[in-house]
Image: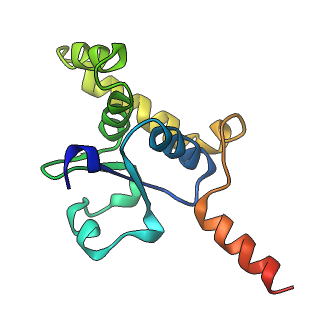
């Protein structure tokens, strides 16, 4: 897996998470894999409690939680102002703590954020289609 083949692992039963994942996928070479679609090989690379946050997996690194979305968004704009801003902020001692605190606050309030930004999660799309075919 090369950097252009990075994989964003996310909660594919969350409308807010799906919105963000689709945003990243549409603007980068990052592939999406939901928690429900993990292969054993990919699962093995994730931390023990992987369902607590998203992860960006590359050949040589696994970025988790706030760092995963930070890196994914930076890859959307790999040579532009977003990447430059991320690289700049990483120079500050408190940045990592602030990034992770912000990530956790948003993640803990996904239901509220999902009222503003949301897409039908892949897991629900499949179950909705199966329900309709059963009728």
Q: Position of residue 87 (x, y in %)?
A: 22, 18
Quarter holding the N terminus? bottom left
Q: Nearer the viewer, residue 109 or 26?
A: 26
Residue at 21% over, 20% down: 90
Q: Nearer the viewer, residue 44 or 128?
A: 128
Q: Position of residue 44 (x, y in %)?
A: 22, 69
Residue at 49% over, 45% down: 21
Residue at 39% over, 31% down: 76
Residue at 21% over, 62% down: 45
Q: Is residue 88 above or below residue 15?
A: above
Rendering quarter of residue 71: top left
Q: How many marks do you count on the picture? A: 0
Rendering quarter of residue 73: top left
Q: Position of residue 43 (x, y in %)?
A: 28, 68
* 57 relative position to 120: left or right: left
Q: Is residue 33 above or below residue 62?
A: below
Q: Is residue 130 above or below residue 94?
A: below
Q: Position of residue 88 (x, y in %)?
A: 23, 12
Quarter holding the C terminus? bottom right
What's the colour scheme?
A: rainbow
């Amino acid at each position: 897996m090369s950097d252009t083949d990075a994989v964003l692992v996310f909660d594919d039963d969350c409308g807010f998470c799906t919105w963000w994942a689709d945003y990243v996928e549409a603007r980068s070479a990052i592939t999406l894999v939901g928690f429900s679609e993990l292969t054993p090989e990919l699962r093995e690379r994730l931390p023990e409690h992987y369902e607590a946050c998203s992860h960006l997996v590359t050949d040589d690194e696994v970025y988790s939680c706030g760092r995963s979305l930070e890196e994914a968004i930076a890859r959307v704009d790999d040579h532009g102002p977003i990447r430059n801003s991320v690289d700049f902020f990483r120079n500050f001692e408190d940045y990592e703590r602030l990034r992770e605190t912000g990530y956790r606050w948003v993640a803990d309030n996904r239901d509220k954020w999902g009222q503003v930004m949301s897409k039908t999660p892949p897991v629900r799309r499949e179950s909705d289609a199966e329900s309709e075919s059963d009728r």
